[in-house]
Image: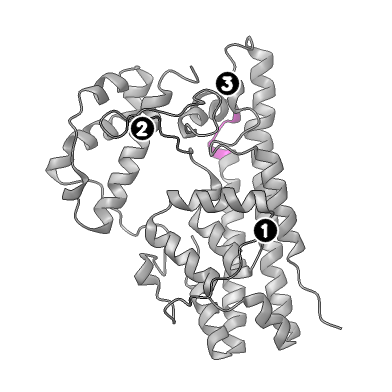
Amino acid sequence: MEPQRQSLKPALPLSLETYHISEEYGFLLPHPLAELPDHYQPWMEIANKLPHLIESHQLRAHVSKMPLLDCRFLKGYRQQRLAHLVLAAITMGFVWQEGETQPQKALVQGVEAILRHSRETLLQALQQLKLSMQDITRTLAQMHDCVDPDIFYSVIRIFLSGWKDNPALPEGLVYEGVATEPLRYSGGSAAQSSALQAFDEFLGIRHFEESVGFLHRMRDYMPPSHKAFLEDLHSAPSLRDYVLASGDGCCLTAYNQCVDALAELRSYHINVVARYVISAAAKARRRMPSHFSPHALEDRGTGGTAMLSFLKSVREKTVEAILHPRA
């Protein structure tokens, strides 16, 4: 069943700064660090040469010589974010070297508008939210100009996949010096987007039970402060209830326009997946023998879920969120 809204209330009003969220850049980190302290240079040296090391099949040898460094010397959120990015990229490359063998200040503004019963502020927030989602859709379209589907499927995609729910590594991966049993982690997934999940929470979109489990598990791959922001959005006053109770036709229309924009974004995402994974997989099967084709990922996302069925289910529940005036 769909989780109920928590009884505990977040500290209101919400503050973006508390969650390391930028008013201008959303969930992206403004002016991110390019280097870590000298203690972590062994990580940076490998990260800076990662494409070359993968292409030349030397990454594993370099990682094997890498010293075990203590994360406790990282100072502050910005260093932690860069270290997280560096280690995640190195880990993905290490495993798959040989192949298979952000929204603006609108969400917070909307919550505050509900608390203050400010109709005009809420309308402004919903308008900005709609424009932000439309911008994301337009940005996603640039993928067609910059990335060849065959290269993405056959070369890039393997390095985005993880070792949870992946037939190529069914037991997971042993992290020497960390755990004696294999650990299983998902690869990259759009469900790990803090922005997309924030849209759902703010608009009050409730997904199917099987989808909710995956979406909530993906929050464990977000920065903890972003995960906390989503949880507090969930606990904040319901936008849907407020719009329905207000009986305001303009607010209802603005809300529905946001839902439509999110549904359009998800439809476009489905089209991208169809071109870059489904169609590309079919071409790969025709080009090479089946035992060389990356078949383990043909019908699954790099995060480990069945792609099209999951994406269509979240789009379906998004469309169902459209509000209708009460009689």
| Residue named by callout 1 | 1
Tell me if 145 is positioned left or right of 220 in this view. Answer: right
Mark 3 crowd level (few <14, some 14–19, many ≥20, 10 Å Cα): many
Say above or below: 141 vs 249: above
Q: Secondary structure at mark 2?
A: helix
- Residue type at tag 3: Pro
Residue 295's quadrant in the figure? top right
- The magenta segment: 145-149
Q: Mark 2 to mark 1: distance in Å?
A: 35 Å
Q: Mark 3 to mark 1: distance in Å?
A: 35 Å
Q: Secondary structure at mark 3?
A: loop
Mark 1 crowd level (few <14, some 14–19, many ≥20, 10 Å Cα): few
| Residue named by callout 3 | 294
Q: Is residue 21 visible?
A: yes
Q: Position of residue 37 (x, y in %)?
A: 15, 46
Q: Quadrant of the C terminus?
A: bottom right
| Residue named by callout 2 | 91
Residue 273's quadrant in the figure? top right
Q: Seen from this angle, which residue lies furthest bottom?
A: 117
Q: Mark 2 or mark 1, which is nearer to you?
A: 1
Name the residue nearer the viewer: 278 or 320: 320
